[in-house]
Image (cartoon, rainbow, N blue to C red):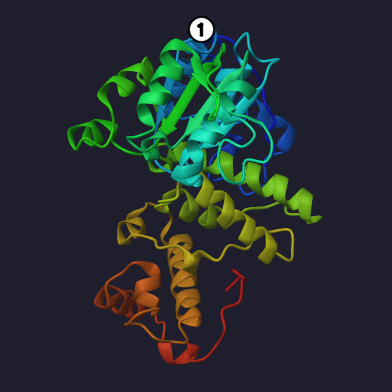
Amino acid sequence: MSHLGVAFTDPEGLAGASFPKVMGIEEQQLFPEPAMSEYCFEGIIGKSPAIKKVLEQVAIVAPTDSTVLLHGETGTGKELIARAIHNLSSRRDRSFVRMNCAAIPSGLLESDLFGHEKGAFTGALVQKKGRFELADGGSLFLDEIGDISLELQPKLLRAVQEREFERLGSARTIHVDVRMVVATHRDLCAMIREEKFREDLFYRFNVFPIEIPPLRERREDIPLLVAHFVSNLAQRMGKEIRFIPPYVMEFLTNAPWKGNVRELANFIERAVILTVGDELEVPIAELRIPSEMFLVTRSTSTFQQAESTVIIEALKAASGRIAGKGGAAERLGLKRTTLQNKMRRLNICRADYFNKPMTPHWNQ
């Protein structure tokens, strides 16, 4: 998904960026996408202290050639950070080569990294350059380095440390000039203790570590991300979505998002597909919302209406069932008794929703 970008070239410029109040969750009208550039740093959207700290670190390390280790949960945007580091470096006009180490079978990983000669193994019909060679003069981003086997790690250490290697089936040493950015969601220190990751390789990668915060630690950024995703997706799908109801934005802001930005983006795409008018229609009942969310302070009538809407949609999706697998309580992440108490307080009768399909409409 493309992002509008504005390149802050120094931490002071980033810290001085202003963030208009228009993007607060109390606003219904969708913020115009062109203005999103004020919240964007090399395609990374946010205004929270947590993400600002990350971007300040990016601005500091990018002009150097130092190796960077990105650590963060799945879906937090580690590749976007890696691209920002490359784009703000002197290598920006050279190749940015990425590789997901977890997505390639261990038997093929060495060939993908270092390349091979014709006939090096069964199926090697032509000579192939590896990722290190393709990234010569540019940057190489290795994602999920915690999935690299112990057998391959010594060869990777040599390539990173000495900037030289041999293709499979060749005795000729190849020298490269590559800037390394690596990432993982794993606890590498724990893997070292368990003898699953080499300590010397960890120290070679851990020159400049950056911790990428999960979405739950930067909730101030969720309205910005929602508005951005809605704007881009609506344009792509030819829809005119101009409003996001305040209670919808509040639920989105407080949802768990265990899959982080990736999960949020996919959920918003589903919501845009379901929307038929100019107001975003969100399948809130699909979110596993913790019970603490109902403690969010709002005006009583507005919040009760939102709470009632969510419960009704969950009952519709569960055909009136409260307990059991797929029941309304499970869908909402509530205990059965808690949900029943809320239904009594809101005068909701589950019998009204037996075998009634869920409809993505929120004007109850």
Is residue 107 something one can see in this rendering? yes
Q: Quadrant of residue 183?
A: top left
Q: Residue 189, image x and y in percent?
A: 24, 30
Residue that badge 1 annotates: 64
Q: Quadrant of the N terminus?
A: top right
Q: Residue 101, image x and y in percent?
A: 47, 39
| Viewer-proximal residue among 60 and 321 | 60
Identify which residue is drawn at 25% across, 36% down: 191
| Viewer-proximal residue among 156 and 285 | 156
The residue type indicated by label 1 comes to Thr
Tell me the element at label 1: loop
Identify which residue is drawn at 47% across, 77% down: 312
Is residue 346 something one can see in this rendering? no
Q: Quadrant of residue 150?
A: top left
Identify which residue is drawn at 67% across, 45% down: 30
Q: Residue 16, image x and y in percent?
A: 54, 14
